[in-house]
Image (cartoon, rainbow, N blue to C red):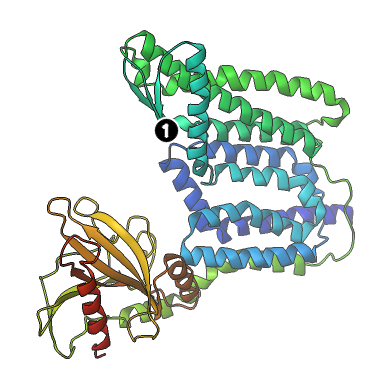
């Protein structure tokens, strides 16, 4: 009987673990793409190897787990899977990747109970160190690096003028860019500290202390690295190659001032803790395993919650394609007292990546007012073909300069315009001529001027099989460059919309 039970436990692992690969296949693809394309996150391969190594070290403890089930974990997993579905529909990569280790932990907790948390949660959550959230700390780390280098320069009696991230010496200038923030060294150091703590320490307090120490040592190493480059430039009159090529130098400093001190610190901490430290083979072994609720319903329910967000788009694919094919927006054809649309008369155009729809035309009123109507969008939003996308811009930065961005509200609704539009004024650097733009989004029939609302509405619409999205805009030339020069054009916009015939 015991042999049969042991065999069935192994069988469950063989059957269930591939579900994590299939259900989160899109997330795993994005992880590997991120690690391959981004120099900041190339350490992701190291993180994944560390996670797998720790799980392998704890294979005996994992094999001994029995299905106990956790209603709380299953409820949390349901909430996380719904969030993942929305994040997938909105294509918010950082949320999807951040949810991946959380979903794995909740999935295992739902099936094997607290024993899975004690055994596998720590190693799996190390994946957070490979999620693209850490580069957001670059500006803060840049400021800290400049602050401490100011102190180092004063101690070394090197005269410098500092303007935010620019450090100017008599021999030249040094710009503390994002790469100089030390975020790469910080991520690697935090991971190594957490990895060592998972491998050898049992108490959470000791693991936290080691991770904090690793982070501080990595920041110190980066400050020394930046100061070393500046000092080298100062003493060699900017003739050293270190000024331009300091990649290897940075990692050498990281080893000397982070890894070596961290090694000795972890050894002393381990010796001081004594009985607290554990051998790798014993780490994470569950202290107790509850009996009861041993049913295939727990693995089935938990696995369904992991895999269903990936199945929803497949189930709705036919509906999404049908809606996309039937959607053919057109410029307004009949507007009383206006002539148009006049094609090839546009004086402005948005900069969108691979739009499926890109329509523009100018309407001229009887009193010679001009209004350009622009419709740019996508029939089926997908990767790199999204309405709300960082590469999509309202205007070309090389041709126009931003003057102002405001919101304009209306008391009544309109068939093609929401109750609020985004008003943008841009100018040409050459002659200071200005163009005013009223813009809003149409996401599956939902009109809004808010980018955030358009993103969320687009995600909810996509879940129902409607992935359409378009930018609508009115554009016109202001009379002059003054702040009141656009009033006449605003009145023309309002008159055009009020007279529009659908």
* Above or below, 62 relative to 325: above
Q: Quadrant of residue 264?
A: top right
Judge by depth and name the residue closer to the eye, 340 or 389: 340
Quarter the C terminus occupies: bottom left
Judge by depth and name the residue closer to the eye, 253 or 82: 253
Q: Position of residue 288 (x, y in %)?
A: 89, 49
Q: In the visual, does 366 lie left or right of 271? A: left
Residue found 26% across the figure and 68% down from its top: 437
Q: Residue furthest top?
A: 235
Residue found 23% across the figure and 81% down from its top: 330
* Above or below, 92 relative to 494: above
* Above or below, 127 relative to 452: above
Q: Position of residue 426 (x, y in %)?
A: 24, 59
Q: Which residue is mark 1?
A: 164
Q: Position of residue 89 (x, y in %)?
A: 48, 67
The answer to whether one can see residue 482 in this image is: yes
Q: Quadrant of residue 82?
A: bottom right
The answer to whether one can see residue 251 in this image is: no
* Above or below, 4 relative to 48: below
Residue found 71% across the figure and 54% down from its top: 13
Q: Position of residue 156 (x, y in %)?
A: 49, 11
Judge by depth and name the residue closer to the eye, 135 or 322: 135
């Amino acid at each position: 009987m015991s042999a049969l039970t042991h065999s069935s436990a192994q069988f469950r692992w063989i059957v269930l673990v591939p579900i994590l690969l299939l259900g989160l296949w899109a997330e795993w693809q994005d992880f590997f793409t991120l690690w391959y394309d981004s120099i900041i996150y190339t350490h992701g391969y190291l993180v994944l190897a560390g996670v797998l190594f720790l799980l392998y070290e704890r294979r005996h403890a994992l094999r001994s787990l029995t299905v106990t089930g956790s209603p709380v974990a299953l409820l949390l997993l349901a909430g996380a899977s719904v969030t993942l579905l929305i994040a997938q529909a909105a294509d918010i990569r950082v949320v999807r990747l951040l949810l991946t280790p959380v979903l794995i932990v909740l999935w295992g907790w739902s099936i094997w109970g607290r024993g899975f948390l004690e055994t596998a949660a720590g190693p799996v959550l190390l994946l957070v160190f490979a999620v693209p959230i850490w580069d957001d700390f670059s500006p803060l780390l840049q400021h800290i690096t400049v602050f401490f280098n100011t102190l180092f320069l004063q101690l070394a009696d090197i005269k410098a003028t500092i303007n935010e991230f620019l450090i100017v010496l008599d021999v030249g200038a040094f710009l503390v860019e994002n790469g100089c923030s030390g975020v790469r060294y910080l991520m690697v150091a935090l991971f190594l500290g957490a990895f060592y703590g998972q491998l050898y320490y049992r108490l959470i307090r000791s693991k936290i202390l080691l991770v904090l120490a690793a982070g501080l040592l990595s920041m110190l190493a980066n400050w020394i690295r930046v100061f070393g480059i500046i000092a080298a430039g100062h003493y060699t009159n900017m003739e050293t190659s270190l000024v331009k090529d300091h990649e290897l130098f940075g990692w050498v400093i990281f080893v000397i001032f982070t890894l070596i001190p961290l090694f000795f610190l972890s050894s002393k901490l381990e010796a001081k803790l004594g009985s607290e430290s554990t051998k790798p083979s014993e780490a994470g072994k569950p202290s107790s395993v509850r009996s009861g609720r041993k049913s295939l319903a727990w693995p089935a329910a938990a696995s369904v919650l992991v895999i269903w967000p990936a199945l929803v788009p497949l189930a709705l694919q036919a509906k999404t394609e049908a809606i996309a094919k039937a959607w053919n927006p057109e410029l307004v054809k009949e507007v009383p007292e206006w002539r148009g649309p006049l094609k090839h008369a546009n004086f402005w155009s948005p900069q969108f990546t691979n739009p499926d729809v890109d329509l523009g035309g100018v309407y001229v009123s009887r009193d010679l007012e001009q209004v350009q109507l622009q419709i740019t969008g996508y029939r089926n939003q997908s990767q790199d073909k999204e309405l709300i996308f960082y590469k999509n811009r309202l205007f070309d930065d090389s041709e126009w300069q931003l003057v102002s961005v405001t919101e304009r509200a209306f008391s009544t609704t309109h068939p093609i315009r929401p109750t609020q539009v985004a008003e943008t004024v841009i100018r040409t650097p050459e002659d200071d001529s200005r163009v005013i733009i009223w813009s809003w989004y149409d996401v599956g029939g939902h009109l809004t001027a808010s980018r955030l609302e358009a993103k969320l509405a687009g995600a909810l619409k996509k879940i129902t099989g409607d992935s359409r999205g378009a930018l609508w805009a009115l554009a016109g030339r202001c009379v002059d460059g003054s702040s009141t020069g656009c009033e006449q054009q605003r009145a023309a916009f309002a008159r055009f919309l009020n007279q529009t015939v659908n």
